[in-house]
Amino acid sequence: MLDIQHSLAQPDIAAPVAIRRVDYTAPAWLVPTTRLEFTLDPSATRVIATLSVTRNGDHRDPLKLDGAGQRPLSIMVDGVAVNDWHFEGEQLVIPLSGDAHVVETEVEIAPDRNTQLMGLYASGGNLCTQCEAEGFRRITYFPDRPDVLSRYSVRMTADKARFPVLLANGDPVAQGDLADGRHWAEWNDPFPKPSYLFAIVAGDLAVNSGSFTTMSGREVSLGIWVRKAELAKTDHALEALALSMAWDEATYGREYDLDVFNIVAVDDFNFGAMENKGLNIFNSRYILADPDTATDYDYDAIAAVVAHEYFHNWSGNRITCRDWFQLSLKEGFTVYRDQGFSADQGSRAVKRIEDVRGLRASQFPEDSGPLAHPVRPESYQEISNFYTATIYNKGAELIRMMAAILGPKNFRAGTDLYFDRFDGTAATCEDFVASMEEASGIDLTQFRLWYSQAGTPRLSASLSHDPAARRATLTLAQHVPATPGQPDKAPMVLPLAIKLFGADTGTALIDERLVLLDGPGETIRFEGIDERPVLSINRGFSAPVVVESDRSAADLAFLSAHDDDPFARYEAMQQLMLETLVASASTGRAEHDGVIAAVARTLEDPDLDPAFIAEAVMLPSESFIGDQTRIVDPDAIFRARDGLRRDLGTQLERQWRQAHARAGSAPFAYTPEGKGLRRLRSVALAYIMASDAPDAAELALAQFEGADNMTDRQGALTALVSSTAAQRDTALDRFYARYSSNPLVLDKWFQTQAQSSRDDTGTVVAALARHPDFTLTNPNRARALIGAFAANQRAFHAIDGSGYRFLADHLIALDRLNPQTAAKLLPPLGRWRRFDAKRAGLMRAELERILHTPGLSRDMVEQSSKSLE
Ligand code: ARG
Ligand code: ZN
């Protein structure tokens, strides 16, 4: 029993402090083995943790164990109860005299009151865990840091009727029944792992099982665990898992290492999924799919996330991170790996276009705003705030650049060296780069700036031609903008894939080459050039930069029709559209003919893949247009884009109808061809709606009603939701009636309405927030409405400030339940510098109101205070 003074003393929760990368020190104590015994009960779960601990190095420091929220019921050292421990903040400090001891703690926790969804929590009647980054300390006392690797054995005891399935990391060892209606199971994970990879699940679950034979001939049993009623929606995820396992063997030589690999889907989850060793836990939206409820986009995302989490088994689990500043070591690399996997399953070109669009939509704004941070940050207050597009997506671009600089052979030699040398360790970004250098003999000293300097480099490129000298001259200059804490930047290494085309013949004047720009500027001469050259630059988006070139509209139109790199071709069209839109947003008038002609040519090109056409003819988003301007005028941007959409719709109506009809007849099949046609079909439908043709809404409703799959149905709903036609409400009502019992599809119903460009979207969204099906306790639902609304540039930035107030009200409410998910939705308010004085003032006022809310979480304090700076 505990001494009374200890049980009364409340651990004090410290005010936010910055944790700095340079302060890293090795752990004072190691934990070679960990034994956990769970007596599971939703309202009172007992956890006994038995840690073998060994002193690491020559020091007299006590053992410090992280905790959060719980209270110790007992503490024993080497089998004897002790009471000479104390708290430092939320850390439990236990003095230890020798160099090796066994420390046992017992705590009680309440999963059913855990609304943060970190640690052990209840979802849909089942119990599950989420430990990354610092959730394990909410389960038991432990050195909860990624460089303390331990071998875990776990025993779970629970009511058998309520929790018939008991899963944990590693391999199952034994199970049995107890006389009182309870049962137990033991699991053993032979691989030492950090606490953030720990997981258990207890629930009433059914399994879709499969098997995979690894390259060395070992048999692995695969399981996707869901509620019984959802079993029919798990085949796609199971197939994706087997494909991922084969792909990682073929592409990186990496083999799976346990006898079982389980995935569990849960409805309440803070992000996409989690790579716990041998027991991945997923947001159900990244597992469940059938044609009636999931779009092609959902199918693709499921395969990508299943692959991502599986790939972490090597890039994350076998080799983990020394500290959280190294997060991109596993996340950037693993995103790069899952992008490669997806590219190999379908169209490489379309995948690259999608990834770049995602980077520009989420990472570029982050990199140019108050929350900008390097891929390897220097400090943080709350690590959950650093699971960002910079760490993940820009991090993946860094790996891609190194792969381009090294070439495929050297890159593979580099990853082989990295995997072999650091297996079983907690490594750093530096270890990865050094492996690349050592395997290739290529010096990456300057390249390392990509890890330490934040901000998106801007590249200016200008090509001139001297016909008499038969010479073309390319002038390049780079500039890296200032970001918080980094006023001055050194020039980076920019790998730029470049090619020149003849303006008259359309033939290549030089072969594609990779130019490494490593200084502030450079001039490159191309000799023997007779024909006027057109510049194709940053092909394949070889460097994650903003390119400013002086290419004329005619040259961009030329490239959009003739470039042989699909990404560059798409990019030329985007650039052409952007220039038109930015001009018309600032002057109120615009010449649309150039864009219309280029779109017509693309639509009519018989050699193009429909999936590519659909990407190429889509206008840049309102927020991306806004990102090109210094002060964003949301209404002017909306009018400019709407005007161009209308003109494209009207003038190319015949082509849109053809494209729409072309995709119409075939029954659903999830194939690259089927996906491409469906995508083009819905893009075409949206343009037909924009043309205001009298039958447009009827056509959309017909697509909605006749669809044999969610992609077409959702596409029609999206086309209708911005219109004032009566068919809009018909479709929304029928959609609700059909799917109101399916939470993932109901999310689409909320989200689609939040994305509408109608004038009344703010009012509609406010009403939806009071809808009986709306709740802040489910992160998917909160994101579907609140997150989608904040991304709707025109509606969110309503000049009366109603959008800002709505967001702030809901974030304050959500913060009380789930700080991590609330803080993730805050960044749109931090964009105030890019808006006019009136909007900026209103946005700042809401940030201030949030920051001064009593009891605000550390997550929100960090995001809102940094956003105000
Ligand atoms: N490691 C997980 C992944 O595969 C995500 C974990 C996110 N954790 C967090 N605290 N936001 O990407
Ligand atoms: Zn990941």
Image: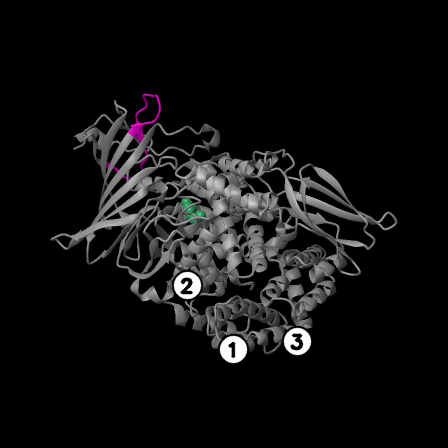
Q: Are marks 3 and 2 in contact (CB under 8 Å)?
A: no
* Sequence-earlier tag: 3 or 2: 2
Q: Amino acid at mark 3?
A: Arg
Mark 2, ligand 1, within 8 Å: the answer is no
Residue tagged 3: 654
Residue tagged 1: 702
Q: Amino acid at mark 2?
A: His
Q: Is residue 575 visible from the viewing direction of this image? A: yes
Q: Are marks 2 and 1 in contact (CB under 8 Å)?
A: no
* Sequence-earlier tag: 2 or 1: 2
Classed neighbour count for the residue bearing mark 2: other residues with Cα under 10 Å, few (<14), some (14–19), many (≥20)? some
Our reading of the magenta stretch's main secondary structure is: loop
* Camera-side residue of 843 and 29: 29
* Residue in the image at 35% along x and 37% along y: 149
Q: Amino acid at mark 1?
A: Ala
Mark 3–mark 2 Cα distance, whole angstroms, equals: 37 Å
Count of marks placed on residues = 3
Image height of 516 relative to 700, above or below: above
Q: Is residue 617 magenta?
A: no
Q: Are marks 1 and 3 in contact (CB under 8 Å)?
A: no
Mark 1, ligand 1, within 8 Å: the answer is no
Residue tagged 2: 236
Quadrant location of the N terminus in the rendered image: top left
Comparing labels 2 and 1, the label whose residue is closer to the camera? 2
- Stretch in magenta: 54-72
751 left or right of 49? right
Q: Is residue 851 visible from the viewing direction of this image? A: no
Q: Position of residue 80 (x, y in %)?
A: 17, 29
Q: Label 3's element?
A: helix
Image height of 847 relative to 438, above or below: below
* Sequence-earlier tag: 1 or 3: 3
